[in-house]
Amino acid sequence: MSIASPACSEAREVHSHRRVIVALSLSSFVEWTGAGCMMPLLPLYLRKLGAPVGLVGVVMAAFFLAAILVQYPIGRLSDRIGRRPVQLAGLLTFAVASAAFALIGTPIAALFVRGLQGAGAGVVDVANNATVGEVVSPSQQGRAYGTLFGSRTVGLAIGPFIGGLVGISGMRWLFVAAAVASLLACVPVMLAVPRTGSRHPHLPASRVVLWRDRGVLGVIMGYAGAGLVIGVYEVCWSLLLHLRGATGWQIGLSWTLFALPFAAMSVPGGWLVDHFDRRYLAATSTLMSAAFAATYPFLHSVWLLVGLGAAEAVAVAVAGPALAAQLAHSVPSRQLGRAQGAGSTAQTGATAVAALGAGALFALHPWVPFVGAASAIVVLVALLSWCWRGVPGREARPDDSRGGALGLAGASLALPGPGPAGDPASVGESQAATG
């Protein structure tokens, strides 16, 4: 064998992984551009169908509640049958549900269709995250997750703008557009994503008990903290700006000015994740989110609120890639679907709980939901920090030999020198055996 063979093999692997990331990012962008088209107008459309305000909230919450029910079991299923079938099934489910929205005429039917949308979107996110952790080398996972999350955020910035231009009168066409976008999002997945992505399927891997693994528990708490603030913002951000005298276009602009800096910072944030300790980055970014949330209700300038929202996007963009990469490094690749399902369930559940209670708390006093969420996040970060004591923040996954310079197969082969993040690669293997 020539000495150049391993290097050529590694170059082919890197090219293949980049192809997968480009495909997932393009798919996510198309999916969420279509989904975003109908998001800002959906509550108004439900009111047009005759839904009372209370039922509108229930229909919107059905998206999250359905995702909670399916993310863990479907993530676990993807460990057995592969990621691509789950991704395609989720996208097709979302497409069918979106098309059904264009045909229904009652709020009760909308409740079930919205739940179906949430189930489809929820399993796609789990499978996408697991795919990245499964096929991308540890030294590049932060940037890979940053690219994926940034692409989704760009779609969520563009979609609502398109929906606002079309208006409520064209809502049925927006549902059709969302269905078509979801179908188009299947194409990159079919072309570039492997059915099963494990780089070392022949290697034995100890089963990680998620609820007993401190590394996984810390990630779940981080995801829950993110979900709390998302739920509060979903309900209360526009209400707070309106209370401060913001016009409709200023409220819309505030969402766009959050999404665009967030997307722009996602890849640089991923680079930080690849080069520094993921635990400190995740904890610091999450605490900064709490600080911003606790500050907003005490400000009275609309433009100051909008500007700080954009600043928050830059500060918190690193949290998602850091948490996802930490989770990918905590469990064997063939258990990533189950682990990502647990993390996504925690975030979606926290979002649903926060969204359901935020309106009533805002009515009590505008600062209550913001400060309440911030306080809960501080507690979660404290628990997260306790869970992560002694948990490595910069080393390879338990069942892989990818910590070696050439990424050679064979878990029992101990290559000399540190892994890609500066820790001995063997540390991860021993952790898995005891996890």
Image (cartoon, rainbow, N blue to C red):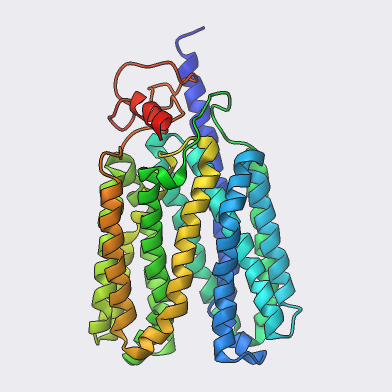
Is 167 situated above or below 374? below
Check the image and name the residue furthest to the right: 103
| Residue 257: quarter of image | bottom left
x then y, percent, for residue 72 = 56, 53
Q: In the orientation shown, which residue stands out farthest toward the top?
A: 1
Instruction: Name the residue located 38 percent from the left edge and 22 percent from the top edge.
Output: 405
Q: Residue at position x 44%, y 41% from top?
A: 328
Location of residue 2 with respect to 223 vertically, above or below: above
Quarter where residue 33 is shown: bottom right
User: Residue 152: x percent and y percent?
Assistant: 50, 59
Q: Nearest the camera: 140 or 22?
A: 140
From the top left corner, tell me how far across and down residue 256 is, in percent: 42, 72
Position of residue 295 relative to residue 130, above or below, is below
Depth check, front residue: 177 or 298 = 298
Q: Is residue 145 left or right of residue 170?
A: left
Judge left or right: residue 335 versus residue 146.
right
Near-viewer residue (24 or 384)? 384
The quadrant of the image that shows the C terminus is top left
Compared to 71, does 251 lie above or below?
below
- Report the number of discs: 0
Res 143 visible: no
Determine the image quadrant of residue 327. top left
Give the image location of residue 413, x and y in percent.
Answer: 42, 15
Q: Residue at left 35%, top 85%?
A: 240
